[in-house]
Amino acid sequence: MNIVETLPLSLEDLLDYYETTLNECEFIRDNLKDGLEFVEYVMKPRAVVSVRFNKYESYFKTLLEHLKWRVSSIALDEDLPISDSEARKKLIEEVDYELCGVSHPIGREEIEPLLESINDVIENLNILISEIEKLKLKSIFLCHSSEDKDFARKIAEDLIKRGAKVWIDEAEINIGDSLIKKIQEGIHNSDYLGALLSKNSIQSEWVQRELEIALNEEIEKNNVKVLPLMIEECEIPGFLSSKVYADFTESGSYNEEFNKLINKLKE
């Protein structure tokens, strides 16, 4: 579940929207092609084609306006690498469509410009989606003490905006869920477990249980699973002492250490 509710949107939210828009455009394109083939077959415009064209044309115009908003700097973080994407620039600056103003009869002269604009959107959306897919990060389960909730929320939101799928208890566990079962599923389904280390967390029984689950999986699969993230000076548990950790304890170190975590999630 995505806990980010503010703008700019997360990569996951943008990707979902772009993929939905792509599917809609492909649907409109295919139906318009059928209409064009029918017009050419009967060798003259038909009312049924005109009615469909007007509906699809209006819908595409609205779809394009919404898409332009979601590739703008309002919805897309300018700090992301895709902000400089040529496909994004074309969608903002070059791809456009004006309603033809003809209700009937509709023929090739009206259908082809709409198809051309739709194909431009499809081409650039495919490129943009591919670029976002390359930026997506591996998933991470945030293991933390309830006393460290504010830091957990901040880093979760920052990770989601950068393209990671983040498991954090308040966003994933609903009333009536089995707490232990949901946590086990969350750890198992996540590529990594980020252990937020503090004086509170190293004393927490729940944190110790979560770490035990993740470390057992790490041993069984012989892959790194647990990533220590120190957020407060504390004694590192013996079973984590051999691991390199990200140090968020120093004032002003957040961005540097956060980028180290991002680089790990890219592997």
Image (cartoon, rainbow, N blue to C red):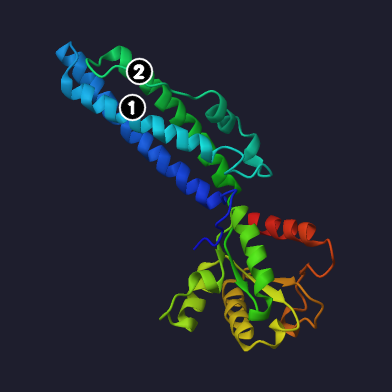
Give the alpha-carbon distance from disc 1 to disc 2, as whole Å.
9 Å
> Where residue 33 sits in the image (x, y, percent)?
28, 24
Which label belongs to residue 41?
none
Between residue 10 and residue 217, name the one nearer to us: 10
Side (left or right) of 147 relative to 210: right
Q: Residues within 10 Å of mark 1 (few under 14, many from 20)?
A: many
- In the picture, the quarter occupied by the C terminus is bottom right
Q: Can residue 58 be seen here?
A: yes
Between residue 35 and residue 265, name the one nearer to us: 35
**Image height of 46 relative to 214, above or below:** above
> Where residue 101 sits in the image (x, y, percent)?
33, 18
Residue corresponding to mark 2 = 100
In the rendered structure, are the residues bearing label 1 and label 2 in contact, judged by CB atoms less than 8 Å apart?
Answer: yes
> Where residue 251 sits in the image (x, y, percent)?
84, 65
Identified by mark 1, the residue type is Glu
Residue corresponding to mark 1 = 57
